[in-house]
Image (cartoon, rainbow, N blue to C red):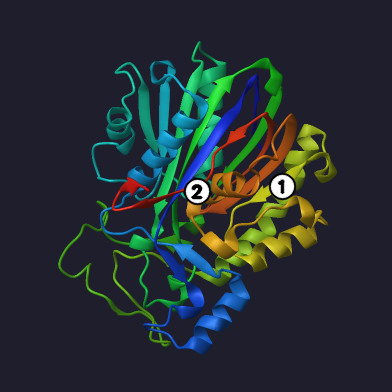
Amino acid sequence: MAYLEFKGVGITAMAAAVPKRVIKNREYTEFWSAEEANAIVEKTGIEERRFADEATCSSDLCLAAAEQLFADNDINKEEIELLVFISQTPDYRMPATSVTLQHRLGLPNNTIAFDINLGCSAFLYGMSVVFSMMEKSNLKKALILDGETRSKVYSPRDRRSAFLFGDGGVAALVERDEKFGKSTFSLNSDGSRANLIMIPAGGYRHMSSAETVVEKVVDEFGNMRSDEQGYMMGGDVFNFVIREIPRDIKKTLAFAEKTADDFDYVVFHQANNFINSYIAKKMKLDTSKIPSTIAKYGNTSSVSVPLTIVSELKNKLDGKKDLLLSAFGVGMTWATAIVPFCDCKISNVVEVENGVRI
């Protein structure tokens, strides 16, 4: 197993944006009974989510978060040298959304900009890429933008995913400073399980057609979706997670010569309450150190780890705080990160409507 280690690079400020529209899961009964909705909420812990309107894309959420970040931290845009955009719901097939955001944010033309398409573990992957580029160069300031509008890709008629996913965007400022010390990343993949979470059509293996956009019954329970809407094999995903995630966390801690007690906070991917509670119990973690946004934002894919930090750890990252981060999802891919935060400035979560911050 390979580990990545970096020194003197860290996140100095963060901001987040969510759509204004709130979906209350117990009232999400257009296609399902109140009894079914309540049963799903009790199992997953997801009370409500945020859904983007037709005019709002992942880039708009990231733009709003970045603008809030700039305003609250008096950032000189001319100093941003690298922009990485993370998403599986980009604005276009091409060009890369990062490049359009470079222009919309008014960043200089010598800004390095590219996208990362990965899934729920992508923020940790993106951090490792940016940390590496900054440590091995003279880059001083970088921007990680992570946005997802998963509500646009799952069918409300498919009970297995209809109540899980929400939308959000996050901006993180990364800088070089010796005060951060060492960070450690474990990044993993298993493509043999690529079919566990998938949108079968709409790419170039199975291109869009009149047939791929038609919703149809997909199982004996009457669930419906098109080939261009996502599906998830929940039982197989759960079995994968409970086997691989605790193992990876333990191995990463051993490599870094740390224990779970060494961390101020442990931030998990916000898949559902049951999974996170199971992992915490299995690893005997202090639940008071585990912030959660599952109830109010649901599963926001790659955004969930940074959104949880912004939402729940504002005013709690003064001085030096050591965070253990863990995420898993589409691919399958999974990651564990040991990251020091030093006086990280967290902005209030802002809301977006019709593509505009309000």
Labels 1 & 2 near each other (Cβ < 8 A): no
Q: Is residue 94 left or right of residue 81?
A: left
Q: Amino acid at mark 2?
A: Val
Q: Position of residue 290 (x, y in %)?
A: 72, 53
The quarter holding residue 264 reads top right
Going by the picture, which residue comes out furthest to the top?
Answer: 138
Q: Amino acid at mark 1?
A: Val
Q: Quadrant of the N terminus?
A: top right
Judging depth in this view, the residue of 13 and 331 nearest the camera is: 13
Judging depth in this view, the residue of 300 and 133 nearest the camera is: 300
Tell me the tag on residue 266: 1
Q: Residues within 10 Å of mark 1 (few under 14, many from 20)?
A: many
Tell me the tag on residue 303: 2
SS for callout 1: strand
Query: Of marks 1 and 2, which one's residue comes earlier in the chain?
Result: 1
Q: Is residue 191 visible?
A: no
Going by the picture, which residue comes out furthest to the left?
Answer: 210
Judging depth in this view, the residue of 261 and 12 nearest the camera is: 12
SS for callout 2: helix
Question: From what the image shows, is residue 132 above or below residue 28?
Answer: above
Tell me the tag on residue 309: none
- At x 37%, y 22%, the residue is 112
Distance from Cα at disc 1 to Cα at disc 2: 16 Å
- At x 36%, y 27%, the residue is 113
Q: Is residue 276 visible?
A: yes
Q: Is residue 322 left or right of residue 345?
A: right
Q: Residues within 10 Å of mark 2 (few under 14, many from 20)?
A: many
Q: Is residue 33 left or right of residue 203?
A: right
